[in-house]
């Protein structure tokens, strides 16, 4: 045991460092010495010197890098030109770096990178067209500064709480006052002069001798649609608020359009004209949404417009007045012409009634009134050849009536178009023969029915899936026929990017109108020109978009 103890002590003594600057504190327990080994003083000295040289080299390199970085910053921030002979004391590396910077800047300038970036930012944020009506800046009223009663040296008023209300609270609905009955002067509210442009009467009086029924085969029709385009000049703000209805004037020398908005305003826009605001004239014959409008085919200077406020007026450009055609308290929804001279109208209202109005009769009342639905009549359409037949879009069914067999209540329908599960937005006879009826329903389907035989239940030909849910802030979508091609129709779309689609009655998609720069909103209201290759679309901000060839 003694021998082992002696050997252990000898090893510990050999492993102990020669010079210890501090005494090692030991605990009460027996522990091993710190692992600071020194086997050979000579080897230790050599290694220490080598490490010292490495450390000094590393410190020197770090200092050199710092000086180099500082010199680069001084060169970049300096405005002093380098001497041509000594280069300002810069090293070869620094001169090469400055030359690379100069070459990079020259290359970026040559390809106009920064300018292209700014142009791309402008393109990615399309702005609404500024053509048409100008927005008037509101005059800010300067009010005197408010002061408390204490600063005015006045005593505070003693206020008493009002008595608690009892019974049912009555909320008064604020509505705009309806225009007075009778003719209204045709004065544009966006012009200082009350006189209408002379070109307007000349344009509306134009005799369009071109045949409106120019049906062509589908190949030629698709080719004509592809040639129609839209530019910035073909977009303009025609009315102030959301568009509810729009129509083309039948003239062929120029494109003249009319549209009605949410608060009873009617706008006229001639494409490429300079009268008014970029060719826009704005009138205010109604006070509530203009739900339906149409130009008279027998008298091109007359535009009939119907409003929810219960008024149906005729804008006579020749007389420069808005004549009062038909007037009730409120609730008119739709109308159509029942005679070739456009003197007899069928008018539908929100109460499930249709009225037969003869414009030749004195006064502004109806000749007869008939209840056809218990809820509402959303659309009426007259057969283009047999004018005694008219289709009525009721709650969930479309009924075709004969005006010669109408009764005050419970009139018998000649034919019915079944299959709709929700409310029907519109129903229109085909424009040439009336052998088809096109319906738009809130169950997300567009349907085409065969009405050539006028059977009790007209057969369904085609059902096309189409998103019809626009929400409360957009006008409902309605599919409408092309007057020149009675087997094709157009409808707006909720798809992105925004578009307008043209379908064949078989359900085949014929063409899609798209433009990323000039079309970025939903065009709820659409209409084709009766003779020219032109299409209009109206959105919720009062702008008309025109596709034409």
Image (spheres, helix red, strand yellow):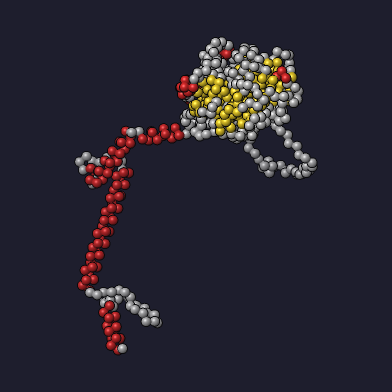
Of 443 and 77, nearer the camera is 443
Q: Residue 283: x, y in percent? A: 62, 21
Q: Residue at x 58, y 24 (%)?
A: 480
Q: Residue at x 69, y 20 (%)?
A: 402
Q: Residue at x 71, y 18 (%)?
A: 404
Q: Residue 151: x, y in percent? A: 67, 42
From the image, which quarter does the N terminus lie in?
bottom left
Of 546 and 96, nearer the camera is 546
- From the viewer's perspective, is residue 443 above or below residue 95? above
Q: Is residue 471 left or right of residue 19?
A: right
Q: What is the number of callouts on the image? A: 0
Of 429 and 341, nearer the camera is 429
Q: Is residue 413 left or right of residue 254?
A: right
Q: Residue at x 28, y 53 (%)?
A: 65
Q: Is residue 139 left or right of residue 309?
A: left
Q: Residue 315: x, y in percent? A: 64, 17
Q: Quadrant of residue 256?
A: top right
Q: Quadrant of residue 417?
A: top right
Q: Is residue 242 visible?
A: no
């Amino acid at each position: 045991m003694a021998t082992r103890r002696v050997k252990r002590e000898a090893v510990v003594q050999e492993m102990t460092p020669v010079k210890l600057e501090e005494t090692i504190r030991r605990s009460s327990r027996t522990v091993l010495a710190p692992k600071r080994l020194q086997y050979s003083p000579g080897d230790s000295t050599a290694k220490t010197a080598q490490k010292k040289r490495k450390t000094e080299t590393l410190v020197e390199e770090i200092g050199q890098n710092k000086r180099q970085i500082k010199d680069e910053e001084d060169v970049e921030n300096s405005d002093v030109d380098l001497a041509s002979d000594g280069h300002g004391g810069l090293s070869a590396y620094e001169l090469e770096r400055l030359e690379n910077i100069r070459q990079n800047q020259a290359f970026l300038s040559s390809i106009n990178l920064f300018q292209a970036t700014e142009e791309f930012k402008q393109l990615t944020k399309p702005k609404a067209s500024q053509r048409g009506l100008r927005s008037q800046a509101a005059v800010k009223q300067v009010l005197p500064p408010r002061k408390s009663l204490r600063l005015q040296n006045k005593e505070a008023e003693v206020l008493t709480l009002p008595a608690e209300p009892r019974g049912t609270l009555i909320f008064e609905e604020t509505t705009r006052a309806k225009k007075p009955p009778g003719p209204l002067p045709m004065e544009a509210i966006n012009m200082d002069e009350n006189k209408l442009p002379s070109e307007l009467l000349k344009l509306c009086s134009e005799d369009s001798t071109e045949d409106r029924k120019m049906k062509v085969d589908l190949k030629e029709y698709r080719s004509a649609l592809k040639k129609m385009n839209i530019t910035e000049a073909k977009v303009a703000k025609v009315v102030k608020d959301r568009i509810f209805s729009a129509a083309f004037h039948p003239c062929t020398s120029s494109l003249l359009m009319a549209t009605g908005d949410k608060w009873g305003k009617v706008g006229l826009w001639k494409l490429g004209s300079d009268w008014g605001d970029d060719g826009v004239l704005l009138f205010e014959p109604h006070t509530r949404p203009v739900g339906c409008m149409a130009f008279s085919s027998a008298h091109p200077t007359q535009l009939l417009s119907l409003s929810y406020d219960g008024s149906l007026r005729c804008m006579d450009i020749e007389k420069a007045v808005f004549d009062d055609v038909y007037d009730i308290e409120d609730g008119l929804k739709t109308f159509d012409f029942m005679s070739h001279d456009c003197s007899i109208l069928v008018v539908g209202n929100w109460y499930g009634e249709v009225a037969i109005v003869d414009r030749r009769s004195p006064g502004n009342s109806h000749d007869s009134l008939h209840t056809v639905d218990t809820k509402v009549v959303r659309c009426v359409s007259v057969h283009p050849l047999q004018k005694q037949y008219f289709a009525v879009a009721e709650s969930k069914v479309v009924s075709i009536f004969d005006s010669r067999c109408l009764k005050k209540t419970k009139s018998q329908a000649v034919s019915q178009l079944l299959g709709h599960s929700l409310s029907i937005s519109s129903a229109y006879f085909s424009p040439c023969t009336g052998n088809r009826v096109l319906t738009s329903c809130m169950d997300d389907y567009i349907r085409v029915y065969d009405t050539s035989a006028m059977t009790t239940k007209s057969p369904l030909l085609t059902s096309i899936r189409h998103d019809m849910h626009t929400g409360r802030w957009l006008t409902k979508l309605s599919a409408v026929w092309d007057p020149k091609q009675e087997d094709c129709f157009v409808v707006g779309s909720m798809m992105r990017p925004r578009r307008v689609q043209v379908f064949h009655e078989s359900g085949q998609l014929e063409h899609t109108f798209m433009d990323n720069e000039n079309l970025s909103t939903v065009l709820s209201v659409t209409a084709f020109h009766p003779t020219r290759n032109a299409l209009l679309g109206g959105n919720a901000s009062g702008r008309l978009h025109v596709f034409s060839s």
